[in-house]
Image (cartoon, rainbow, N blue to C red):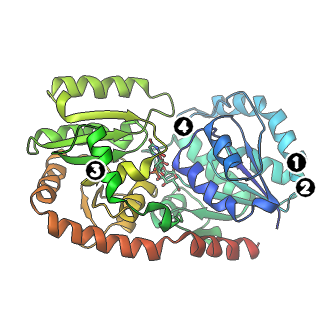
């Protein structure tokens, strides 16, 4: 089966990292079409996955745009639809990985009479999308998609709640290659030394800097933790959230946390950095659709505390594979951090248990097989 994958972004978000893992199985028979250039294209080339940048200008469909803005933007994307429809002639299936890819992919699939698969990685709720954009996504998926793959039960439930057809949805979790996450003790010491954190209890936060990812919640929690608890923030503002970055730096200064916080920016060496942490915190204030960082922490053998909403609830079981705390609650987060700080053995037992379970549950080859079976039925 020849697949034309479509993704709106040139950046490396979770949706793009996951698509790379999916497309690997089809590298002989696929093309990934991007609507923007950037490090995602470089990663695909590195992985020897055929890729083509199909548009160089940003398409103006923002998360909160209204119907008028959306229609205006659709007229500006007409050439892209034509281009995708032309390319789709050489493929059996169009696989849209993001919302804007769905808009283009749906129309191209109609013009070219190719089946459409929509990999839905967002929770279609008011927390994340305007009513207009929810309606557009659901209408296009219902009308044009033969299959909607969601990255969690939570994403599936939100799709149905927003009016999506339940008979076209299947849940497929993100897959991972466990061998890529094997921690090395030498990394642990070396990185902690480099960061000047030898003696500290290090809480790692790995996510793009964005208000709903809740980095500010971890900062607030630090104030309620013992003094030797420090935090490293790995990730950058990927989608223009510079105001939030500014806000975080002000918050650090205001709370007197300068000595206990480091912002490391976007890093491609997430595994060694995670392995150098004593605990990984996930703090999204709105429901996380899946949350790759949670599984990655588990595979690195690091304990994880996550916000109890969305897909995170399907990944973490409190006291067995980590801890869940109510979203946006710095006090309860601080309590868990402090418990982990004081009970290293019990904490590591949970981390080891989570590692075993995650290794089985999210194995990439099994997940890609599941996907292949679903695609084979179209
Ligand atoms: N990530 C990365 N470098 C960074 C920060 C994050 O490579 O500096 C990766 C992280 O390891 C994870 C992905 O970006 O695989 C984020 O995916 P997730 O599902 O957690 O959240 P998203 O940003 O897609 O909502
Ligand atoms: C999206 C979601 C994230 C998920 C990722 C991979 O970026 O925000 O929660 O883990 O897709 O499916």
Labels 2 & 1 near each other (Cβ < 8 A): yes
Q: Which of marks 4 and 3 is in front?
A: 3
x and y percent of residue 249 in the render? 28, 25
Q: Nearer the viewer, mark 3 or mark 2?
A: 3
> Residue 55 occupies which quadrant of the picture?
top right
Up the image or down, 354 lies above or below 72; here it is below
If you read the primary sequence from the N terminus, does the residue marked by circle 1 or circle 4 appear first? 4
x and y percent of residue 236 in the render? 44, 34
Q: Nearer the viewer, mark 4 or mark 2?
A: 2
If you read the primary sequence from the N terminus, does the residue marked by circle 3 or circle 2 appear first? 2
Labels 3 & 1 near each other (Cβ < 8 A): no
Up the image or down, 322 lies above or below 51; here it is below
Labels 4 & 3 near each other (Cβ < 8 A): no
The residue that label 1 is drawn on is: 87
Q: Gap in Å between the C-alphas at discs 4 and 2?
A: 32 Å
If you read the primary sequence from the N terminus, does the residue marked by circle 3 or circle 1 appear first? 1
């Amino acid at each position: 089966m020849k697949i034309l994958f479509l993704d709106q972004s040139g950046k490396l978000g979770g949706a793009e990292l996951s698509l790379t893992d999916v497309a690997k199985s089809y590298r002989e028979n696929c093309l990934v079409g991007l609507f923007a250039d950037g490090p995602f294209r470089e990663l695909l080339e590195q992985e020897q996955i055929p890729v083509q940048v199909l548009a160089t200008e940003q398409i103006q469909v923002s998360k909160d745009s209204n119907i008028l803005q959306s229609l205006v933007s659709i007229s500006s994307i007409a050439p892209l639809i034509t281009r995708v429809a032309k390319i789709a002639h050489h493929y059996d299936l169009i696989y849209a990985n993001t919302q804007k890819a769905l808009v283009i992919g749906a129309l191209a699939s109609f013009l070219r009479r190719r089946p459409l698969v929509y990999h839905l990685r967002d929770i279609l709720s008011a927390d994340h999308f305007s009513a207009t954009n929810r309606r557009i996504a659901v209408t296009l998926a219902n009308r044009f998609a033969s299959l909607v793959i969601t990255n969690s039960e939570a994403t599936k439930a939100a799709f149905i709640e927003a009016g999506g057809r339940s008979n076209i949805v299947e849940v497929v979790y993100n897959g991972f290659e466990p061998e890529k996450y094997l921690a090395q003790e030498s990394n642990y010491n070396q990185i902690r030394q480099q960061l000047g954190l030898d003696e500290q209890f290090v809480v790692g936060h790995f996510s793009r800097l964005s208000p709903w990812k809740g980095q500010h919640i971890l900062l607030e929690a630090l104030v309620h933790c013992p003094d030797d608890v420090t935090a490293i923030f790995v990730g950058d503002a990927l989608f223009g959230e510079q105001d939030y970055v500014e806000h975080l730096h002000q918050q650090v200064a205001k709370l007197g946390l300068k000595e206990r916080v480091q912002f490391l920016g976007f890093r491609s060496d997430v595994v060694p950095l995670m392995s150098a942490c004593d605990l990984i915190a996930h703090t999204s204030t709105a429901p996380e659709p899946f949350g790759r960082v949670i599984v990655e922490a588990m595979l690195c053998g690091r304990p994880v505390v996550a916000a109890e909403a969305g897909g995170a609830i399907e990944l973490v079981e409190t006291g067995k594979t980590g801890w869940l705390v109510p979203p946006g609650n710095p006090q309860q987060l601080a309590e868990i951090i402090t418990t982990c700080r004081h009970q290293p053995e019990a904490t590591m037992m949970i981390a080891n248990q989570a590692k075993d379970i995650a290794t089985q549950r999210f194995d990439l080859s099994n997940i890609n097989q599941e996907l292949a079976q679903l695609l084979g039925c179209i």
